[in-house]
Image (tube, rainbow, N blue to C red):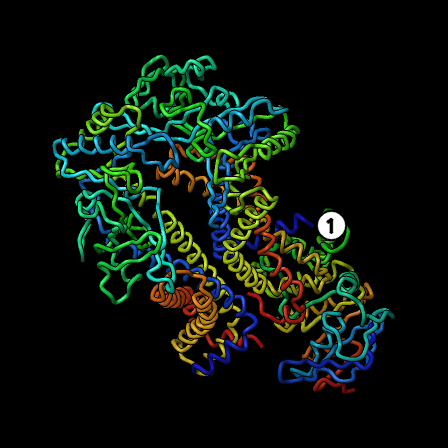
Amino acid sequence: MFKNYLKTAWAVFKRRKFFTFVNLFGIVFTLAVLLTGVTFLDNIFGAIPPEVNADRTVGVYMVNIHGEYEDGGSTNSNGPSGHWFLRTTTTDLPGVERVSIFGMIGKVQAYREDRKIESWLKYTDSNFFRTLEFDFIEGRAYTQDEYDNADNVVVINKTTRDLYFNGESAVGKTLLANGRNYRVVGVVKNISFLRIVPFADIWAPTTISPTFDPLDRSLMGNYMCLIEAKDRASIPLIQEEYEARISAFDMSEYKPFTELVARPESFFETAARNIAGLRREEGGAVTRVLTIFALMVLLFMLLPTINLVNLNVSRILERASEIGVRKAFGAPSKTLIGQFIIENMLLTLFGGVLALGLAWVLLDIISATGLIPYANFSLNIRVFGYALLMVLVFGFLSGVYPAWRMSKMNPVDALQRREQ
Amino acid sequence: MIMLENVDKVYRTARIETLALANINLTVEDGEFVAVMGPSGSGKSTLLHLMGLLDAPSTGSIHLSGKEVRAWGDRRLARLRNESIGFIFQSFHLVPDLTVLDNVEIPLLYRKMTGSDRRKRCIRALEQVGLGSRIHHRPGQLSGGQQQRVAIARAIVGEPRILLADEPTGNLDSQMGDEILQIIEELNKQQGTTVVMVTHDPRMAERTARTIRLFDGRQVN
Amino acid sequence: MIRHLLRLVWARKRSNLLLILEIFVSTLVLFAVFTMALIGLNRLLTPIGFNPENAYRISIDVGQLGDDSWASEAIEITHRLQQELLSLPGVVTVGGVYPPPYSQMTSSTTAQPDSNAAEVRTLQTYVTDEAREALQLNLVAGRWFDEQDAEVSYRPVVITQRFADELFPNEDPVDKEWGSEHVYKIIGVLDEYRKNGELSGLDNHMFQRVSLTSAKGRPIRNFIMRVESGTPVSIEEMVVKRMRAIYPDWTYRIAPVEADRDATNRLNVVPFVVVVMIGGFLMLMVVLGMLGVLWQSVTRRTDEIGLRRALGSPKDTVYHQILGEITLVTLFGCTLAVLLLLQLPLLGILGNIGWQTIIGALMLSLGFMVILALVSGLYPAWLAARVQPAQALHYE
């Protein structure tokens, strides 16, 4: 039975090449755009190396402070936090493997043979290189000792090595940037700009930052932290304990600010909370953002779906005679619906394969524009899974109505239409 | 046995009601070979469609082998059509994308049967109509008479007790028409298949045992 | 003939329904694309009000994010830095500008010309007196900041013509004041200033004066340095070296304003390019899809068309009839879309997009949709015109 479906489907596709082409064009284009978008998001939020422990890592990426003035106005501040604050609130949390505190990227400049080199510098601790597993081309990460001693050491990425050292081995050599001399201890592969937590061109110990003051008690600042749990199960415990610490935090020295929100969570949760405009995690941010995203996807798919439905209806009208015959010889409606949906799914599936290829090309083009430094999009298994899901939904959506029309078709009318 | 009692068929469009059949009462016994004659628009095809359960009467009832089919759902009707009735159309209605063999196979697809069984029966049916050597051709590669023989093979492959033919020779020249009619006659005589054949050719009608005449949707005997 | 076509289209409304739906949604998509395109075009055609050529942006990073304190020590250092830069060869002038053009930072405020009026939003920039020359701003009324603004009780401001028109329509804005706690007084009007450049929105803008000799106003973390044309790029390195020599604890960066412009525009153009490209592909898909549907419908109607031919309809009448039907169906779908879209400005959903843009985009999407429909109908109509009368009679 199924084999017969395939045979019919193949014969139909082959005979009406134009229809098949137009169908495929719509399917491929729609899915390729969606795939590109999903890959993009996956490359921002997905667990991609060096974030290999993402499933048991949470972070305090942003804190929010809120206060009210006596005359009725209110003030609100949202953003990265201070080093002292993150350090003191994360000490001795239960179930934690290690904590890493790192700064926001900043630009540094250097001049080399009349050429300006601009790089992104990120100050981190040594744990940063253990929670995240960077791919070292040569050398190593800086050690806890080097961090404590405020040694002028840096880890650089491959592009920086190319720019400063013409691609030759850099470990042990001196790098001059922002008027300071740094000793290179390691070189890692480029990290895409979209990987907000690990991305930089140059990584240096926070202790050598000229503006680093370990005793600065500001709540808002330039730092984020990663908390790597021993295992997934510990994360709720960590969150609970951290929340308890935050609610016990003494805000008396931060007038007029009285409320503090800080929560260890995934980067996506932080982003979702920001997009949804919620100050605290009220349980709905992630769902809300995902719903909005799903609605946008459906909206985009609306026109291609209508187009495909329209074409499919035409296609079944053309095959009225065949449908009439099948009905006359006792095909139940359900079987006919199944036949058509399978046919449509097959075409969509084939389109999906082509779309994967096209998305790959599109992402290559986006990378080539240089808008995103070191963009390195990977179409991984997970994205392939999303793709398959999208293909099935699309194939199903665009097949249901025509199939229903097909089954409702009066066999007498169908037979009286002339065949082509 | 096919029995129609007080059957009316009315076609309604937004403005006009057309009475296609009025007060039809007739019985076709098992093994009979009946012709239905009448001028264009007299309701011949409608009658055939009603007998074949492709369409439901506006009023009245249809019995097939003693069973009232009026209240039956789509699934049950489809099954009954599949098992008991074979159709032959004036314009063949072969699926152009499929080979002769695949076309003949269609009625068997809706039964529980293995692929090799289906194949065997299809080839047997095709041999019966003298097309055993052309099973891999497309309908477009065959002559009109050959196409109609494929359609007959498709109609009989499920071994139905009833064969409904709507002007089976209408699109063919007289020699080919004779051949087709011969095949149908043989089916009727040798296997006892009930045949109802719509035709407007008196020569064809003469060769049947009984003729039902329609005029303006009414039976005239 | 038109009435005949109307009746035909009406009679086939069920089979035309999907086509109408497709045209309806397509018109909505076209409207979105054209609105974007018109907004972009309007932005491109509006001057930016300053000159990014032969200018450098210098940024000072004091290492404390969000720190707005403007301590006297910091002011004094900043002043020394400015004086040092002014002494460099090839430098025309150096003005403090915060936030600088093409930067991610924005500062905004609202103004209320009188207590009954609505609040008007504006972007603002804090500048030193040299900024006018550094940015080459065009004054159209009043004067720019100078020393006489140092010891006044009000806050002197220079605003753009657009902001002035909104605050005090049909009045001479110079010397007008607003505000109660802080009184702002307009001392001059600029023809235009669009901080984020060519592709940014058409926002109001206001300049406030900062002096590097007093503790008033906001901290200056950026300079715009204008140089003589032909100044070698090596000046960049010299600037950073000299500044570092004066105060090594801060971090200094320099970049040509044109480089900032290119980076900003490259980002700002992305939404336009994405929308236009996706819109274009969607439309190509729609044209091909409609071609398929119309082709199919013509083949299905061979009998009817053959009959028309048999009854004496000439070829081009058939051709025009098919195209006419398509146009009618298209206009029907478009009308539905226009009716829906006209609700948007009434409901205030489109915000501050001007009426002209909306009407323009509506006309363009309507016209374009009809053209697309006709393009997709050409081949089917030609096929229809080729139908021979005999083909219809051949059948029953």
Please tell me which residue is depicted at 73% across the width and 56% down the height of the picture. B110
Please tell me which residue is depicted at 20% across the width and 29% down the height of the picture. C239
- Residue A105 coordinates in the image, percent (x, y): 40, 31
Please tell me which residue is depicted at 31% across the width and 45% down the height of the picture. C265
Left or right: C286 as drawn, with respect to B37: left
- Residue A267 coordinates in the image, percent (x, y): 52, 36
- Residue B106 coordinates in the image, percent (x, y): 69, 57
Left or right: A77 as drawn, with respect to C109: right
Residue toward you, A298 or A198: A198
A288, above or below C94, in the image: below
Circle 1 sits in a helix, a strand or a loop, which is it?
helix
Residue toward you, C224 or A185: C224
Mark 1 nearby-residue class (10 Å; few <14, some 14–19, many ≥20): few
A254, above or below C352, in the image: above
B193, above or below C240, in the image: below
In which chain is the residue bearing label 1? B
Residue toward you, C369 or A278: A278
Label 1 sits on residue: B120
From where the camera sits, is residue A236 visible?
yes
- Given the image, on which type of amino acid does mark 1 rest? Lys
Residue toward you, C124 or A226: C124
From where the camera sits, is residue A195 visible?
no
Left or right: C3 as drawn, with respect to B200: left
- Residue C118 coordinates in the image, percent (x, y): 38, 62
Tell how many labels: 1
Q: Quadrant of the C terminus of chain A?
A: bottom right
* Res C228 → quadrant: top left
Residue reaching furthest right?
A: B66
